[in-house]
Amino acid sequence: MASGVTVTDDVIAVFNDMKVRKAQANEEDKKKRKKAVLFCISPDKQNIILEEGKEILCGDVGTTVKDPYLEFVKMLPSDDCRYALYDATYETKETKKEDLVFIFWAPETASMKSKMIYASSKEAIKKKFSGIKHELQANFLEEIKDRRTLAEKLGGSAVITLEGSPL
């Protein structure tokens, strides 16, 4: 069921910036790249928008942000739904990888109305995010706080570290 909610151009631009990793990007550009970002449904329930101030920049990692995944989890509201993009850095037994993950956060404590509008609008945002290989839906804080939940989506038992931390 579609909700009629539309995805704003700002959301699409952020996705495209995160998706395209510019190998020749200078250090300043790399620092400005987003590591994680949250999206919400606008107060008028018409659009999916960037949630103001809810992002982690790659340049923050290692300086103001020690553990980007834990910091990302802390950004999620305890009582409302969100969509998110998380640029996961992980290691398998063979190689280091980076992949974008689409996350649908729908905590049990969110209102039924919020869960319904976010669930029915999910396809609208996913259609705009072409090329996403990994998707995670989480309903409990304990579930998303556990790095192994994300690691399972990225490659199962082959994943040995996430954001430099062993599983």
Image: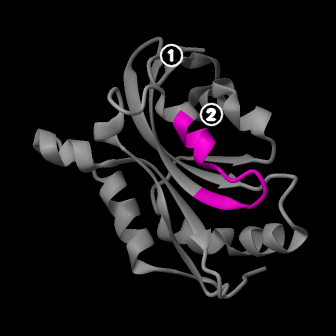
| Residue 82 placement, left or right of 50 | right
Element at label 1: strand
First in sequence, mark 1 or 2: give its number: 2
Q: Report x, y in % for residue 80.
A: 75, 61
The quarter holding residue 151 reads top right
Residue carrying label 2? 150
| Residue 73 placement, left or right of 19 | right
**Where 139 sits versus 7, above or below?**
above
Q: Report x, y in % for residue 24.
A: 10, 43
**Where 75 sits versus 66, above or below?**
below
> For the residues marked 1 and 2, what is the alpha-carbon distance in whole angstroms?
13 Å
- State the residue at coordinates (14%, 44%): 28
Say which of 78 and 33 sits in front. Answer: 78
- State the residue at coordinates (60%, 79%): 42
Residue carrying label 1? 165
Q: Report x, y in % for residue 141.
A: 76, 39
Q: Residue furthest front?
A: 64
- Type of the residue with mark 2: Leu
- State the residue at coordinates (81%, 66%): 115
- Type of the residue with mark 1: Ser
- Looking at the rendering, the stretch of residues picked out in magenta corresponds to 71-83
| Residue 40 placement, left or right of 94 | right
Q: Where, quadrant-wise, is the C terminus in this rendering?
A: top right
Comparing labels 1 and 2, the label whose residue is closer to the camera: 1
